[in-house]
Image (spheres, helix red, strand yellow):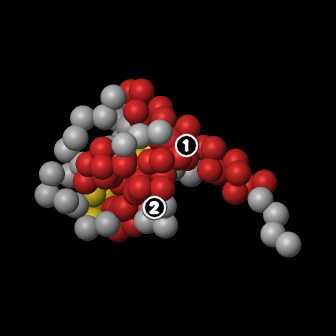
Amino acid sequence: MKVQIEKQDDGSYIAYNTTGDMLQLIGTGETVAEAKSDFMNSMQEMIESCKEDGEAIPTALTEEPEFFFDVSSLFEYYSVINVSAFAKLVGINDSLLRQYKRGGTYISDAQLSKIEAGIHQLGKEFSSLRLV
């Protein structure tokens, strides 16, 4: 199940599934972690409801959710990432990336690709890192 996490206009966060099935689940919270937790709770409540009603549990509820973040949610959830240093790494103006982090600023597909590629590159580097 694909789950989108976004910052809302009021500063809170929402998590919702984007799969094309008839199942719609939502989680909200003041932080991304709270929205994810609320979403997972919604999944569990739906599973329990299906069991109580003797209905088959939809396949989407048996899968591990795959979370997709907007830029604001990404930097809120992974607050260990220094926005200014990351901006330099990916070649984006640091004040512009901070605007993306705050939300409400249009982000082009090219900028999103740079950010995502930078995150993936960091992941590769960290996964191959060895300490001595």
Q: Please name whichever residue, 120 or 13, is drawn nearer the observer in this view of the structure.
A: 120
Identify residue type, mark 1.
Gly
Residue located farthest toward the bottom when viewing the structure as drawn: 132
Q: Position of residue 116 (x, y in %)?
A: 50, 40
Provide the residue designation for mark 2.
82
Q: Please name whichever residue, 27 or 88, is drawn nearer the observer in this view of the structure.
A: 88
**Residue at 42% from the left image edge and 27% from the top image edge:** 110
Provide the residue designation for mark 1.
118
- Helix, strand or loop at label 1? It is helix
**Residue at 41% from the left image edge and 40% from the top image edge:** 92
| Numbered mark located on residue 4 in the image | none
Is residue 28 left or right of 62 when viewed as pictured? left
**Residue at 36% from the left image edge and 49% from the top image edge:** 94
Q: Position of residue 15 (x, y in %)?
A: 34, 52
Q: Quadrant of the C terminus?
A: bottom right
Question: Distance of mark 1 from mark 2, alpha carbons?
Answer: 13 Å
Quick check: 110 above or below 132? Answer: above
